């Protein structure tokens, strides 16, 4: 029983480009599968465009409104240019997290390479938009206005470090939550199997089994919560460099 | 937790580390993530968000329109009610005006009739009084003749003579001069 076995990347065939190994893997398969599920869900929900929505349409609109509300509350009207981006981040992370909870399904977001790439994409967009929106005044982000000089000397390095730490905290938070949860469930599942094969002691297998059932519920909550946290933090980082926070 | 760590460490030893730290898989993971994410982003941005957002907007517009229509209808109803009440008030005023006019006309007619009747009666009274006066005057004029006749008869019976009428008239006038003037 190797609890990390589930995180192995399996190559299906071989595909090399510019000397890089870009082979199609189980990670790629489940990433595309997740995208297909999200697109199918939203396409089905927006197929009829009924005035009085049916069940699927209500769900799709609920999902849409949830993300729209998140964008609106953090970034205001200006943030709506990022609405598709936030929507895509939230939907992708959510479907990856949730799909990963099904047995034999690979969890795309349990890999730091994926969460890191997403986090760096967000931070690069934040920096690019900050420069686009404010030019060199973007650096005011690190110097809150109205502070005396001695404090600025202390505050500016702290702000810079906290800014630079963002992509790491963003990516590690998600990846670690996913990995730890899945590993934990597999460990407890291993206990069930071990105890179940121990003759008369086998009845005790009910204990780790019950625990695992509870953990599964917890993991579903974490899967949704972490997707929300990732999307919300992306919104907040973007709002930091939008019009309201950096003065002119 | 220690069990988990032990298990994880055991796995590490067995497989030579976490699969997450196998950098040889990074290019493939990131490449396919980019492909999947780009597909998702394009589908959302180009098709799905406009469709869902459009449906939501359409519904909000429809609701706003319906509210507008309802407000307009209510305004119209209020106006109709006001017009109705105005008409009613006007009709009432007209009715009371007609009643007052009729009342006045009837009163005027009655007074006129009463005045005409009174005038007629006055005329009749006057005529009757004139007739009475005439009759009385006529009667009075005969009284003298009767008195002369009576006096002549008396003189004739008492004295045996027939007085001249002129002398008799003179005697009568001296006896009661005031009564014949």
Image (cartoon, coloured by chain):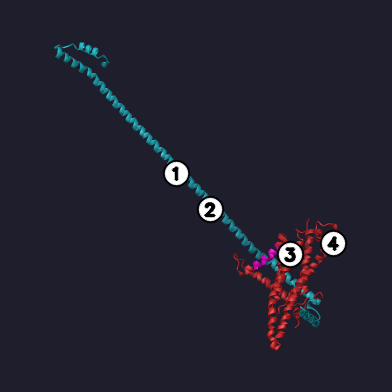
Q: Chain of mark 3?
A: A
Q: Which residue is mark 4?
A: A154
Separation (CA) of disc 3 from disc 1 = 75 Å
Between disc 1 and disc 2, the foreground one is: 1
Q: Is residue A92 visible?
A: no
Q: Are marks 4 and 1 on the same chain?
A: no
Residue A193, located in which quarter of the rendered image?
Answer: bottom right
The numbered mark at residue A150 is none
Which one of the lettered chains is coloured red? Answer: A
Chain part drawn in magenta: A60-72
The numbered mark at residue A235 is 3
Q: Which residue is mark 2?
A: B77
Chain B shade in the render: cyan
Residue B163, located in which quarter of the rendered image?
Answer: top left
Across and down, in percent, residue A12 comes to 75, 80
Across and down, in percent, residue A240 comes to 77, 62
Circles 4 and 1 in contact, beta carbons < 8 Å: no
Q: Element type at marker 3? A: helix
**In which quadrant is the C terminus of chain A drawn?**
bottom right
Q: Chain of mark 1?
A: B
Which residue is located at x 19 percent, y 15 percent?
B151
The magenta stretch spans residue A6: no
Q: Which residue is mark 1?
A: B95
Which residue is located at x 20 percent, y 17 percent?
B147
Between B179 and B42, the residue placed more toward the observer is B179
Across and down, in percent, residue B7 comes to 77, 81
Residue B19, located in which quarter of the rendered image?
Answer: bottom right
Separation (CA) of disc 4 from disc 1 = 92 Å
Q: Are marks 3 and 2 on the same chain?
A: no
Q: Are marks 3 and 1 on the same chain?
A: no
């Amino acid at each position: 029983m190797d609890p990390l076995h589930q995180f192995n990347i399996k190559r299906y065939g071989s595909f090399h480009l510019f000397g890089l190994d870009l082979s199609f893997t189980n990670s790629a398969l489940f990433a595309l599968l997740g995208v297909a599920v999200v697109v199918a869900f939203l396409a089905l929900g927006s197929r009829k465009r009924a005035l009085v929505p049916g069940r699927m349409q209500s769900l799709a609109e609920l999902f849409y409104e949830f993300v729209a509300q998140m964008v609106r509350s953090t970034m205001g009207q200006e943030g709506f240019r990022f609405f598709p981006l936030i929507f895509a981040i939230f939907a992708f992370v959510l479907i990856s997290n949730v799909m990963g909870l099904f047995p034999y399904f690979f969890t795309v977001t349990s890999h730091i390479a994926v969460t890191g790439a997403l986090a760096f994409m967000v931070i690069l967009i934040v920096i690019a938009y900050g420069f686009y929106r404010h030019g060199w005044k973007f650096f005011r982000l690190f110097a809150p206005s109205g502070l005396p000089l001695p404090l600025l000397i202390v505050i500016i390095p702290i702000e810079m470090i906290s800014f630079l730490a963002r992509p790491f905290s963003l990516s590690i938070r998600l990846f670690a939550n996913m990995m730890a949860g899945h590993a934990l469930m597999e460990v407890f599942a291993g206990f069930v199997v071990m105890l179940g094969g121990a003759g008369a002691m086998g009845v005790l297998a009910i204990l780790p089994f019950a625990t695992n059932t509870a953990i599964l519920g917890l993991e579903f909550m974490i899967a949704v919560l972490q997707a929300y946290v990732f999307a919300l933090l992306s919104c907040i980082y973007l709002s930091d460099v939008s019009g309201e926070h950096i003065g002119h | 937790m220690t069990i988990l760590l032990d298990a994880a460490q055991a796995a590490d030893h067995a497989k030579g580390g976490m699969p997450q730290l196998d950098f040889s898989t990074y290019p493939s993971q990131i490449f396919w993530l980019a492909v999947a994410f780009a597909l998702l982003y394009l589908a959302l941005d180009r098709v799905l968000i406009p469709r869902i957002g459009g449906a939501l907007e359409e519904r909000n517009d429809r609701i706003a329109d319906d509210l507008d229509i309802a407000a307009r209808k209510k305004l119209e109803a209020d106006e109709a009610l006001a017009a109705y009440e105005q008409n009613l008030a006007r009709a009432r005023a007209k009715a009371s005006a007609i009643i007052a006019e009729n009342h006045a006309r009837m009163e005027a007619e009655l007074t006129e009739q009463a005045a005409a009747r009174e005038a007629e009666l006055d005329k009749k009274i006057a005529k009757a009084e004139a007739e009475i006066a005439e009759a009385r005057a006529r009667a009075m004029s005969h009284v003298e003749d009767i008195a002369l006749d009576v006096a002549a008869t008396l003189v004739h019976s008492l004295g045996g003579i027939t007085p001249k009428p002129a002398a008799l008239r003179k005697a009568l006038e001296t006896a009661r001069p005031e009564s014949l003037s």
